[in-house]
Amino acid sequence: MCRVLPLLKKNFHLVRHPLVQHKLTLLRKKTTSVTEFRALVSEVAMLMGYEVTRDLPMTTEMIVTPMERMRAPVLKGGKMVLVPILRAGMGLLDGMLQIFPSARVAHIGIYRDHKTLEPVEYYFKASKTLRGRDLILLDPMLATGNSAIAATDRLKGAHPRSIRFMCLVSAPEGVRAFQKAHPDVPIYSAAVDRKLNDHGYILPGLGDAGDRIFGTL
Ligand code: URA
């Protein structure tokens, strides 16, 4: 499954943490229930959140401990903005909010036309202050890449300081397409699978992430 990795460009981060990999295997299993699946997606999102934000800019501020004053590190800039791509991206939101409770949330609704596999935007709601913010785009599956590319196009129009894209499973086709469209946006993924099937699903993948999160199988 990692054969394709040498082909990937530098802005791709494979999150190899053992807990992430173990939980991803549980997610892949056909027998995993909706209840378990939902909880696992949230846990993996939380664990991946550390990797995704590893290089956030820092500054320092003067604080007073019970003992003395010190200059201590803090995140630099405005509140981070999490951007789930509806609907499956919502599954990653809770876990991320656990570690970034003050993050703002912008929603982008994009569905994939089942015939053309092209993205269609049907909803966008964000605060007016995306300018200069750090954005994390969330979608469990990077399949064709079309939705993530369209969402990133839209977000770039709002002039954020940075955009990162976080997913659980990616297809080599999707990684290539995304990197071609947005070489400056890093991808964080827990796996790169074998390929897409004719319907744009990832093989071996984990099935339809939205259906498995929301129990609409
Ligand atoms: N979306 C999914 O939920 N699963 C896939 O395999 C591809 C796209």
Image: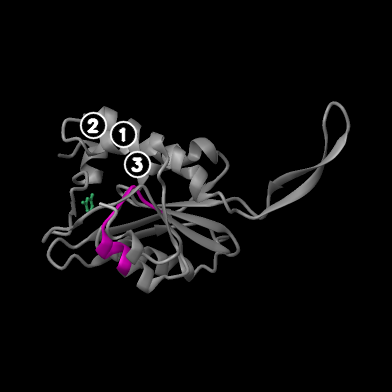
Q: Is residue 195 in view?
A: yes
Q: Are marks 2 and 1 in contact (CB under 8 Å)?
A: yes
Is residue 130 part of the magenta span, yes or no? no
Q: Which residue is mark 1?
A: 38
Q: Which residue is mark 2?
A: 34
Q: Secondary structure at mark 3?
A: helix
Q: Quadrant of the C terminus?
A: top left
| 110 vs 180, nearest the viewer | 180
Q: Is residue 213 left or right of residue 124?
A: left
Q: Secondary structure at mark 1?
A: helix
Is residue 173 part of the magenta span, yes or no? yes
Q: Position of residue 74 (x, y in %)?
A: 70, 46
Reading the chain from its start, which is encountered first: label 2 or label 3?
2
Q: Amino acid at mark 1?
A: Arg
Relative vertical location of residue 185 with respect to residue 203 in this rendering, above or below: below
Q: Which residue is at a point 73% across and 52% down the rendered structure image?
A: 59
Q: Position of residue 182 (x, y in %)?
A: 41, 70
Residue 212 location, quadrant:
top left
- Tell me how far mark 2 sits from mark 3, CA to CA: 12 Å
- Tell me how far mark 3 sits from mark 1, CA to CA: 7 Å
Q: Which residue is mark 3?
A: 91
Q: Is residue 69 left or right of residue 163?
A: right
Q: Amino acid at mark 3?
A: Gly
- Which stretch did the figure color magenta? 166-176
